[in-house]
Image (cartoon, rainbow, N blue to C red):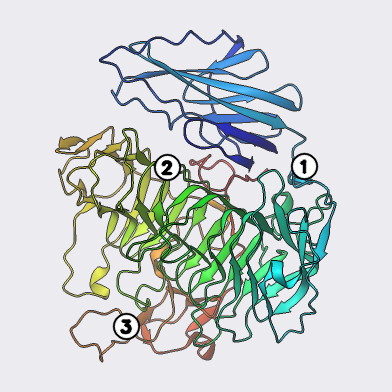
């Protein structure tokens, strides 16, 4: 395990990471960095970017594929590892001789001798998740909310600082929530703390379980800065409970119900609750080791609605297990009309967002410094025939306002609309600078019924949108099942933006459809769109360690069971046709997976009432670490199978 402190360009990030990557040539004693050359008038300097490193024992895997050169020059990559040795290449691995702290420098040079550098500091300890223990220090002061959960009522603190004036809210180290079953939890007006002394909120004396008791909301946190909500068991920092360890120590198989904080509404009838809601001007916070399941709307709903003056900044969401939601898995940033606040420096990594009714990941109002990496999402949009609104059936929805952000090394599964639904979201007062860009690179996308990507929305004419080294597979035209008049688009990327620079580089796709609506071939140029190095060819399925579904499974065969299709387009809102299922189809019903085992077609047969048609299956293990030897090493969860 390692702690990595970034210092490059526009953002500063402190992160915990685990993974393995691969390959570059190793050098002996590192040459000193070349002196910076003066930028020639005709040359734009490259930009050096070190992606999230990953660690296996004392081996660190570095990645500079996010580095850019606006002139399009070829780049040379040189690394100094901080221990007297160096290496070369965009991607590079180095094994250190001992634990310790090392300053790593990347120097990127273009063919005109223009240079840029980036540095990170890597602190290595012994391998293993337990080495993270003590990350928040040993608490010197703590306060347990005086409440005894009775399995029927909820916890409402109101203004928590006013409710407990005896607490010094600027120095308190731990705020504990007693273990037990709550109808709801509401914590409001958290304090504004400093980055070097955050307030850590955790469970104590057992698991905190929220939901399933009929309340109209579940877990709500409002306000404050520099706080942490975690269900992680840490015997040094005194968080969590040793009986509820989640995927601690790289244990991902069958972890449902094992996290210190569990939000589970049991799909309570007629409740469209989100699991965890964060707003009220909250900023600079962290969420980890929380399980959210069987909620009627989104797993996480993170925004301060209709507050254009707010800024949600420096947010870390990691190591959470969100699954089996009726709507979005994760809903970050408002999609409503202005004024809405931007989100900057969001880091979202090592999360599982599995089996979501609508979008697996919905991102809006993104500003500068957002980094979405090493997650597994999907199958998404499995409620596409009965979603709460039309076109709520994509996999990843993205709304971009300004700045530099990236989405990379993720797995995205399942869409009835678009795997990528990408919108410019420029608002009055936003500043657009040369070098602003959103880059989607090194992701794996699979299982879609319509488009691989839709690119539209507001056009600021400045921000660059780049799609690089992504994999696409699993296309099947099925929109007529809800819209009999739908016309097959016949291309992977639909581009409805005529002014922002859009580049499509080194992507691989397996389908016979055209690459874009701008030109038929995978490579070419048309106005603001340029494509190069893209290849139509075979794309292997992704292989998980133990997802509970066979290798090569057609994820489009998994849906949420419904009797009728409310999203069917026929001009008659009072006539929703029956949905038919056939042998080999899979459905989710009230959190249970079933397989259709009867020949023929079947309608209006509720799975638990018809065992002759629907075979109940074991709960999915949801171990979506990549299988050993996977073609896609480095994509997906940071944790790997030993």
In the rendered view, does 324 fall on the left or right side of 425?
Answer: right
The quadrant in which residue 189 appears is bottom right
Position of residue 401 measured from the top left corner of the image (x, y, whole percent): 35, 49
Q: Quadrant of residue 442?
A: top left
Q: Which residue is mark 2?
A: 405
Q: Are marks 1 and 2 in contact (CB under 8 Å)?
A: no
Q: Residue at x 64, y 78 (%)?
A: 184
Q: Relative to 398, say whether 26 is above or below.
A: above
Does residue 277 appear in the picture of this structure? yes
- 317 or 26, nearer to the observer: 317
Q: Are marks 3 and 2 in contact (CB under 8 Å)?
A: no
Residue name at image x 20 percent, y 88 percent: 572
Structural crowding at the residue carrying mark 3, measured as other residues with C-alpha within 10 Å and reported as few (<14), some (14–19) or many (≥20): many
- Residue occupied by mark 1: 131
Q: Taking the image as drawn, is residue 242 in sight?
A: no
Residue at horizontal 51 percent and vertical 60 percent from the top: 550
Question: Which is nearer the eye, 219 or 598?
Answer: 219
Q: Secondary structure at mark 1?
A: helix
Mark 1 or mark 3, whichever is nearer to me: 1
First in sequence: mark 1 or mark 2? Answer: 1
Instruction: Label 3: state its secondary structure.
Output: loop
Gap between marks 3 and 2, in whole Å? 37 Å
Instruction: Please give the name of the residue rendered at 55% of the width and 17% of the height, measured from the top-left corner.
Output: 87
Q: Provide the secondary structure element on which disc 2 rests.
A: strand
- Percent x, y for residue 101? 71, 26
Q: Which residue corresponds to mark 3?
A: 566
**Quadrant position of residue 464:** top left
Quadrant of the rendering where the N terminus is positioned: top right
């Amino acid at each position: 395990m390692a702690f990595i402190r970034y210092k490059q360009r526009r953002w500063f990030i402190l992160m915990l990471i685990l993974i393995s990557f691969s390959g570059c040539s190793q050098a002996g004693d590192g040459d000193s960095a070349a002196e910076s050359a003066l930028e020639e008038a005709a040359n734009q300097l490259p930009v050096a970017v070190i992606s999230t490193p990953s660690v296996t024992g004392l081996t660190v895997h570095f990645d500079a594929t996010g580095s850019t050169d606006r002139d399009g020059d070829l780049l040379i990559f040189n690394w100094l590892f901080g221990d007297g040795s160096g290496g070369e290449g965009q991607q590079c691995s180095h094994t250190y001789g001992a634990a310790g702290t090392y300053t790593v420098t990347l120097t990127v040079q273009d063919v005109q001798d223009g240079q840029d550098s980036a540095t990170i500091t890597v602190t290595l300890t012994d391998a293993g998740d337990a080495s993270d223990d003590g990350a928040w220090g040993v608490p010197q002061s703590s306060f347990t909310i005086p409440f005894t959960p009775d399995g029927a009522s909820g916890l409402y603190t109101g203004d928590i600082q006013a409710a407990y004036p005896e607490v010094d809210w600027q120095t308190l180290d731990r705020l504990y929530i007693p273990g037990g079953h709550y109808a709801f939890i509401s914590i409001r007006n958290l304090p504004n703390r400093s980055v070097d002394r955050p307030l850590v909120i955790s469970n104590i004396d057992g698991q905190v379980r929220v939901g399933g008791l009929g309340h109209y909301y579940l877990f709500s946190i409002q306000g404050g800065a520099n706080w942490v909500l975690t269900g992680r068991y840490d015997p040094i920092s005194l968080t969590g409970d040793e009986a509820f360890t989640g995927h601690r120590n790289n244990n991902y198989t069958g972890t449902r119900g094992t996290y210190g904080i569990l939000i589970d509404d049991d799909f309570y009838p007629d409740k469209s609750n989100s699991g965890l809601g964060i707003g009220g001007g909250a900023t600079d916070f962290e969420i980890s080791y929380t399980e959210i399941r069987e909620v009627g709307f989104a797993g996480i709903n993170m925004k301060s609605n209709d507050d254009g003056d707010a800024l949600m900044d420096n947010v870390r969401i990691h190591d959470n297990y969100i699954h089996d939601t009726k709507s979005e898995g994760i809903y970050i940033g408002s999609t409503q009309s202005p004024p809405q606040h931007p989100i900057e420096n969001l880091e979202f990594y090592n999360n599982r967002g599995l089996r979501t009714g609508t979008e697996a990941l919905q991102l809006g109002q993104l500003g500068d410094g957002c980094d979405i990496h090493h997650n597994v999402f999907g199958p998404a949009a499995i409620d596409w025939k009965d979603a709460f609104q039309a076109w709520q059936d994509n996999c990843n929805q993205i709304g971009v306002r300004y700045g530099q952000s990236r989405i990379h090394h993720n797995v995205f599964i399942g869409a009835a609309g678009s795997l990528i639904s990408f919108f410019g979201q420029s608002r009055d007062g936003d500043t657009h600078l040369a070098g602003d860009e959103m880059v989607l690179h090194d992701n794996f996308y699979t299982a879609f019924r319509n488009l691989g990507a839709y690119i539209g929305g507001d056009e600021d004419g400045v921000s660059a949108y780049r799609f690089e080294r992504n994999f696409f597979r699993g296309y099947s035209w099925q929109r007529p099942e809800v819209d009999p008049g739908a016309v097959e688009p016949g291309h992977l990327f639909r581009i409805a933006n005529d002014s922002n620079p859009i580049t499509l580089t080194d992507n691989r796709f397996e389908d016979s459809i055209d690459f874009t609506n701008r030109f038929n071939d995978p490579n070419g140029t048309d106005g603001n769109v340029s494509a190069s190095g893209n290849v139509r060819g075979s794309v292997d399925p992704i292989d998980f360690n133990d997802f509970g579904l066979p290798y090569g499974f057609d994820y489009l065969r998994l849906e949420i069971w419904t009797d009728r299709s409310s999203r069917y387009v026929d001009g008659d809102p009072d006539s929703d046709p029956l949905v038919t299922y056939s042998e080999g189809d899979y459905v989710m019903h009230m959190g249970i997976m079933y397989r259709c085992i009867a020949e023929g077609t079947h309608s209006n047969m509720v799975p638990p009432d018809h065992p002759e048609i629907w075979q109940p299956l074991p709960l999915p293990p949801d171990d979506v670490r990549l299988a050993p030897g996977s073609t896609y090493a480095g994509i997906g969860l940071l944790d790997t199978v030993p």
